[in-house]
Amino acid sequence: MKTMILILSMLFFAIGCSEDGSNEQQKPSIYGTWKLIETYGSDGGSNPQWATIKNGYTYIFNKNETFSSTRFNECTTGIYLLTNNTLTLDFDCNEFDTGVEESSGTFVENYIFENNNLILTPSYLSCFEGCGYKFERTEN
């Protein structure tokens, strides 16, 4: 009987700690304003590396799954979807097409958070040496 009470007590303690988040590490959030600070790629050689970008474009991700961006002049708003480690950006302008995306106006990026930065890796480009975009949070 004492063993059963001990097990139940430990179970209640474990549930209580995980529900209030005191024992869980908070996951990074995509919400807020992100500015492009570096791109990853190769200049044709076999040694891809990060290169600093001056005046990079921005993304603003809202909690209602809308976004705005300064990436393209022709279209600056849309909706996004997060699934697993994939970010789908669907620009909402009619007939918007850059010629590189799989479906007109839709960009699918793999994403990770690294050292408080957002790293996007495009699924719509063929980058033999690798390619990516590093964003720094400018506002929450």
Image: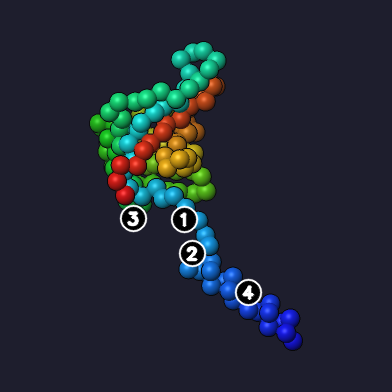
Q: Earlier in the sequence, mark 1 or mark 4?
A: 4
Mark 4: which amino acid?
A: Leu
Report which residue position mark 3 lands on.
64
How far from the left and from the top, in percent, is residue 62?
32, 51
> Residue beneath label 4, please?
11
From where the camera sits, is residue 71 visible? no
Of marks 3 and 4, the one in the foreground: 4
Q: Residues within 10 Å of mark 3 (few under 14, many from 20)?
A: few
Whole-angstrom CA distance, mark 2 to mark 1, is 8 Å
Distance of mark 4 from mark 2, alpha carbons? Answer: 16 Å
Q: CA distance from mark 1 to mark 4?
A: 22 Å
Q: Earlier in the sequence, mark 2 or mark 1?
A: 2
Q: Are marks 2 and 1 in contact (CB under 8 Å)?
A: yes
> Which residue occupies the foreground of this view, 76 or 57?
57
Q: Kindly identify which residue carries mark 1.
A: 26
Does residue 100 appear to the left or right of 92 in the view shown? right
**Residue at x-position 59% and y-position 76%:** 12
Left or right, 33 with respect to 103, comes to: left
SS of the residue under disc 3: loop
Q: Residue 11 or 99: which is nearer the viewer?
A: 11
**Is tag 3's residue or tag 2's residue first in the polypeptide sequence?**
2
Q: Is residue 37 left or right of residue 127?
A: left
Of the two numbered discs 4 and 2 on the same chain, state the one appearing first in sequence: 4
What numbered label is drawn on residue 21?
2
Q: CA distance from mark 3 to mark 2?
A: 24 Å
